Amino acid sequence: MTLVIDTGEAAGVRSFIPDWFLDQYAVAPDDSRAVHDYGYHLIGSVNNPKTMKTVRAHTLAAWGFLRALAEMHPEVFDEFISAYAERAMSFDDPQS
């Protein structure tokens, strides 16, 4: 007897994008557009937290999305990494 476990469908890239972000579209975008736009949202949000510790925490929370971003839009991923590096270098104490 073979045991088969149904785990449902594999999670798509949209599972890494918050619903509140997708709700802003009048018409649902395709995956590529949604990933592109959320990538730029993350680039902008790198400068919002007051401490590098919070920037790190937000980046780690988006880790799964960042992998999808690197695969679908490597140029946007590179911009995110550059923005992160610039932000990290702006702190005198990298542990803050």
Image: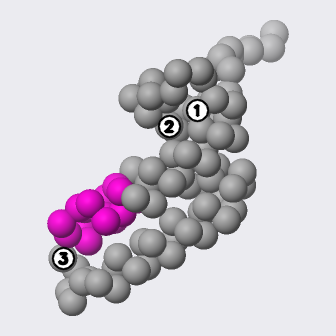
Residue 91 is inside the magenta segment: no
Residue 84 vertical placement versus 38 (above, below): below
What residue appears at the point 44 percent right and 28 percent down from the top-left corner? Answer: 24
Q: Classify 10 Å Cα crowding around label 3: few (below 14), some (14-19), many (20 and above).
A: few
Mark 3, residue position: 96
Marks 1 and 2 close (CB-CB < 8 Å)? yes
Q: Amino acid at mark 2?
A: Ile
Which is more foreground, mark 2 or mark 3?
2
Distance of label 1 from label 2 (alpha carbons)? 5 Å
Camera-nearest residue between 83 and 8:
83
The mark that comes first in sequence, 3 or 1, is: 1
Q: Quadrant of residue 90?
A: bottom left
Distance of label 3 from label 1 (alpha carbons)? 32 Å
The mark that comes first in sequence, 2 or 3, is: 2
Distance of label 2 from label 3 (alpha carbons)? 28 Å
- Quadrant for the C terminus in the image: bottom left
Residue 77 vertical placement versus 88 (above, below): above
Mark 1, residue position: 14
What range is drawn magenta here?
Answer: 45-60
**Is residue 5 among what the camera can see?**
yes
What residue appears at the point 20 percent right and 86 percent down from the top-left corner? Answer: 93
